[in-house]
Amino acid sequence: MNAKSTDTARRALLLALPVVVLALVPAARAGERTLEGEWGGLDARGQTAQVVVVSGKILGFFWGGDYRDTDAARLLERGSRIDFKFATGAATLIKTPEGARLTVREVGRAPNSIDLRKN
């Protein structure tokens, strides 16, 4: 390869690099908006909650002092919201700028919202 063709190839690479980087930024930020991972928190009354999300599915849900079985989750809003049911109610996990918010609705009780942090 001569010097001129090497210089041309180098320029082409330098011109293409910003385009590639800009294309990858939205994909990286999309990961920030999803709920993948383990989330936990404590409400004002001392009630603890934990939700484990993998590939848009609830693998673990701790509520009321025990792990609960959950039905199939509905992934909404490009992965930033998950609705699911359990034996005594339903819950919604929503991504927030600070972490996530879990709202639990149980039969015969007022809805309880807890701010969660990623563990």
Image: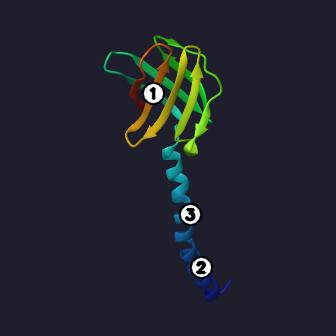
Whole-angstrom CA distance, mark 2 to mark 3, is 17 Å
Which of the two discs, 2 and 3, sits closer to the camera? Answer: 3
In terms of secondary structure, where does tag 3 sit?
Answer: helix
Work out whether mark 1 precedes mark 3 in sequence or the reverse, and give the earlier one: 3
Residue 52 figure quarter:
top right
Residue 97 figure quarter:
top left
Residue count near mark 2 (Cα–Cα under 10 Å), binned few <14, some 14–19, many ≥20: few
Inspect this view and state whether residue 119 appears.
no
Residue count near mark 1 (Cα–Cα under 10 Å), binned few <14, some 14–19, many ≥20: some
Inspect this view and state whether residue 75 appears.
yes
Q: Eyeballing the image, is 82 above or below 86?
A: below
- For label 3, the residue is 23
Left or right of 64 on screen, residue 6? right
Residue 118 figure quarter:
top left
Which of the two discs, 1 and 2, sits closer to the camera? Answer: 1
- For label 1, the residue is 103
